[in-house]
Image: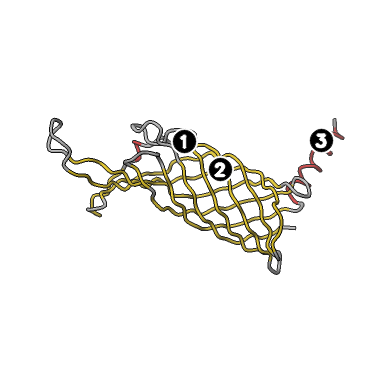
Amino acid sequence: MKNYIIILLLSLSNLLFSQNSFSIQIGGALNLLSQTETVSLKPGANVSFTYQTTLNNKIQMLFGLAYLQKGYLQISPITIDPLSSYMGSYENSIDIQYIRLPISLKFPLGSFKESHCFFQFGIYGAYRLNTTQRLLSDPQSTRDFTMNVHEADWGLNGAFNIEYPTKNNFSYMASIIYDAGLVDVVKYIPGSRNYGCGLMIGIQYHLK
């Protein structure tokens, strides 16, 4: 039994401290929360911290912690009373802030000059921090919208990454990211799932 424990500890040590790296990425995204005629794209900010470990000479596993903004623009009709005809519309801006924990696998695609290209695919779980709603025509109309949004979100994500190594174990990074949420986000809008694409840039430091 003691030998098995020693082997397990050595394996974990090799996983945690061999051929690993730590990266910081900052960027923006266009987020689509619901694919309907009354909802449109809205940009948001992302900040991501990622720990990356090599499973073999090619495949890598990534564990992340990220802060990100999801949101959408909702077009709502204006009517005089419930029996009247359509008279116009106004736009609501909905901003949702999340803490996300992604886990993914990273596969090499090849190299171009001194840059290396990768494909990344995985899953994520996210916790909603807070949400606000405001009319675009009235910046002072901001109100708390948190109770209308589910606390948890989870889904699939993928990315195309380019890394350019520099000196002292650092490398520059750029990623095109796509999210596909699997659960409803807004409680009163069926099918309101987090979809979106974004561009992230950052730096990566290789621990060994």
Are the two marked residues, 1 and 2, in contact with CB atoms closer than 8 angstroms? no
Q: Which of marks 3 and 2 is in front?
A: 2
- Identify the element where label 1 is drawn: strand
- Identify the element where label 3 is drawn: helix
When the figure is inspected, residue 84 is found, relative to residue 143, above or below; the finding is: above
Which labelled disc corresponds to residue 152? 1
- In percent of width and height, residue 126 lies at 50, 40
Of callouts 1 and 3, which one flags the residue occurring earlier in the amino acid sequence? Answer: 3
Q: Which of marks 1 and 2 is in front?
A: 2
Residue on which disc 3 sits: 5
* Residue type pointed to by label 1: Ala
Are the two marked residues, 1 and 3, in contact with CB atoms closer than 8 angstroms? no
Q: Tell me the distance, in whole angstroms, between the alpha carbons under discs 1 and 3.
A: 36 Å
Please state, as top left, top right, bottom left or bottom right, where the N terminus lies in the image: top right
- In percent of width and height, residue 18 lies at 77, 52
Q: Tell me the distance, in whole angstroms, between the alpha carbons under discs 3 and 2.
A: 35 Å
Depth order, front residue of 80/19: 80
Which labelled disc corresponds to residue 157? 2
* Residue type pointed to by label 3: Ile
- Identify the element where label 2 is drawn: strand
Q: Which of marks 1 and 3 is in front?
A: 1
**Residue located 25% across and 54% down the image:** 139
Q: Tell me the distance, in whole angstroms, between the alpha carbons under discs 1 and 2.
A: 16 Å
Of callouts 1 and 2, which one flags the residue occurring earlier in the amino acid sequence? Answer: 1
**Taking 168 as reference, is 199 left or right?**
left
- In percent of width and height, residue 117 lies at 66, 56
* Residue type pointed to by label 2: Asn
**Taking 47 as reference, is 107 left or right?**
right
**Taking 105 as reference, is 36 left or right?**
left
Query: In terms of image quadrants, where is residue 84?
Result: top left
